[in-house]
Image: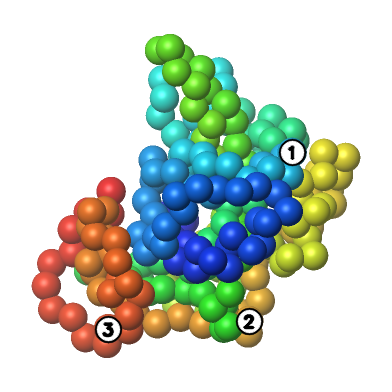
Amino acid sequence: MCGRFTLRSVDRVRIALANRAQLEGLIPRFNIAPTQEVVVVNSSNEAELMTWGLIPSWSKESKGVINARSETLDEKASFAESFERRRCLILADGFYEWQRTGRARKAFYFQMKDGVPFAFAGIWDRWRGNGSTINSCAIITTTANKLLEPVHDRMPVILHENAYEMWLDPKCSKQELKKLLEPFPEDEMKSHPVSSQVNYVDIDNESLIQRVEVEVGTTPSLF
């Protein structure tokens, strides 16, 4: 799964979005969590903020799902229509994953070797209820590459830049799209252990991505 990620390179993201939209008030984020706003490029090739946690339009309650498995995207009622009609790019420059050893968890931070921003493959939907409208999204996951395997058996789908246009193209077939949902090459990524402070939603600063080799203490709930 993917339960936390970062978007710290604000200026670089603004440059990447220059031809799509101007997002005001964008600040560096080091601990983006479910139900919070994330920056996406939607199916209309426009940048906007969406709630992380996809709420199907037909749902009776505003409860979202943060991840969608690539293997069953076109089978699950919650995701099938969004996969066909409402795909998006979810912008990031790193993400966290947790390694379980018995009851203990150790957090790791993953990013590109050169630290550049990238895009997760995502899907989105629009929910209306209780007098409000919520645009929400989910990150698609796939099997882990060799870098992630020792930590977790799943990873978010990271798209190569030359696949962005195809992912957003409404005319692209499901068969072509599913070919994009592969583990990202491990030789283009790097990782290191980080503090369990990332488990606290209210902590959001640069210290979270710093390397921590040994840490003693309890690990709180992620959400």
Tell me if mark 1 has few (under 14), some (14-19) or many (20+) residues whose alpha carbon lies within 10 angstroms of its own.
Answer: few
Q: Which residue is mark 3?
A: 212
Q: Is residue 192 visible?
A: yes
Residue 6 position (above or below residue 151): above
Depth check, mark 1 against mark 2: the one in front is 1
Q: Is residue 87 visible?
A: no
Q: Which residue is mark 1?
A: 44
Mark 1 falls on what kind of element? Answer: loop
Question: Which of marks 3 and 2 precedes in the sequence?
Answer: 2
Residue drawn 56% across and 22% down? 57
Which label belongs to residue 188? 2
Q: Position of residue 156 (x, y in %)?
A: 55, 59
Residue drawn 50% across and 21% down? 133
Mark 3 falls on what kind of element? Answer: loop
User: Mark 3 is on which residue type?
Assistant: Val
Q: CA distance from mark 1 to mark 3?
A: 41 Å
Q: Residue furthest bottom?
A: 213
Q: Residue furthest top?
A: 131
Tell me whether circle 1 and circle 3 mark residues in contact (CB < 8 Å): no
Q: Position of residue 93 (x, y in %)?
A: 52, 67
Q: CA distance from mark 2 to mark 3?
A: 22 Å
Question: Which of marks 2 and 1 precedes in the sequence?
Answer: 1
Tell me whether circle 2 and circle 3 mark residues in contact (CB < 8 Å): no
Q: CA distance from mark 1 to mark 2?
A: 29 Å
Question: Which of marks 3 and 1 precedes in the sequence?
Answer: 1
Tell me if mark 3 has few (under 14), some (14-19) or many (20+) residues whose alpha carbon lies within 10 angstroms of its own.
Answer: some
